[in-house]
Image (tube, grey):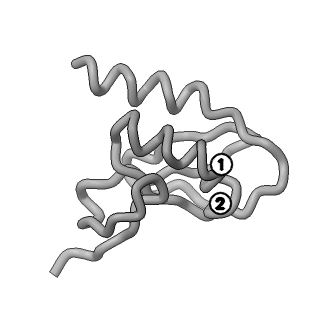
């Protein structure tokens, strides 16, 4: 049975393979494609809607346990590109 994680955007549970792991690296959100980067990770559906929900709820800071603001522009651009292709 595949592990199940919760999307920090929509709060729905889903198989790990259908979610994208995100980590904070030097005050920037980075997509962890292989789910092997060190540090605390948060899981997110790879959609712009879930990303925007997570940002609106300020879920990245809580899930990743970072107190400073994190730059999410690179992650947002990546998700937008994925949705367009």
Residue 66 in picture, x, y percent from top left:
76, 57
- The residue pinned by badge 1 equals 24
- The residue pinned by badge 2 equals 64
Q: Residue at x 24, y 58 (%)?
A: 17
Depth check, front residue: 24 or 77: 77
Q: Residue at x 59, y 44 (%)?
A: 56
Q: Residue at x 68, y 44 (%)?
A: 25
Asked whether disc 1 touches disc 2, contact meaning CB atoms under 8 Å apart, the reply is: yes
Q: Residue at x 60, y 52 (%)?
A: 57
Q: Earlier in the sequence, mark 1 or mark 2?
A: 1
Q: Please identify the quarter of the rendering in which residue 85 is found.
A: top left
Residue 69 in picture, x, y percent from top left:
79, 42
Q: Is residue 74 above or below residue 70?
A: above
Say whether residue 34 is left or right of residue 16. Answer: right
Residue 76 in picture, x, y percent from top left:
50, 29
* Quadrant containing the N terminus in the rendered view: bottom left
Q: CA distance from mark 1 to mark 2?
A: 7 Å
Depth check, front residue: 79 or 31: 79
For discs 1 and 2, the disc positioned in front in the rendered view: 2
Q: Is residue 4 above or below residue 7?
A: below
């Amino acid at each position: 049975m595949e592990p199940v994680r919760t999307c920090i955007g929509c709060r729905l549970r889903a198989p790990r393979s259908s979610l994208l792991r995100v980590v904070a690296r030097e005050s920037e959100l980075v997509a962890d494609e292989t789910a092997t980067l060190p540090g605390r990770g948060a899981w997110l559906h790879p959609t712009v809607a879930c990303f925007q929900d997570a940002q609106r709820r300020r879920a990245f800071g809580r899930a990743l346990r970072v107190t400073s603001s994190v730059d999410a522009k690179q992650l947002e651009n990546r998700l937008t590109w994925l949705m367009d292709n």
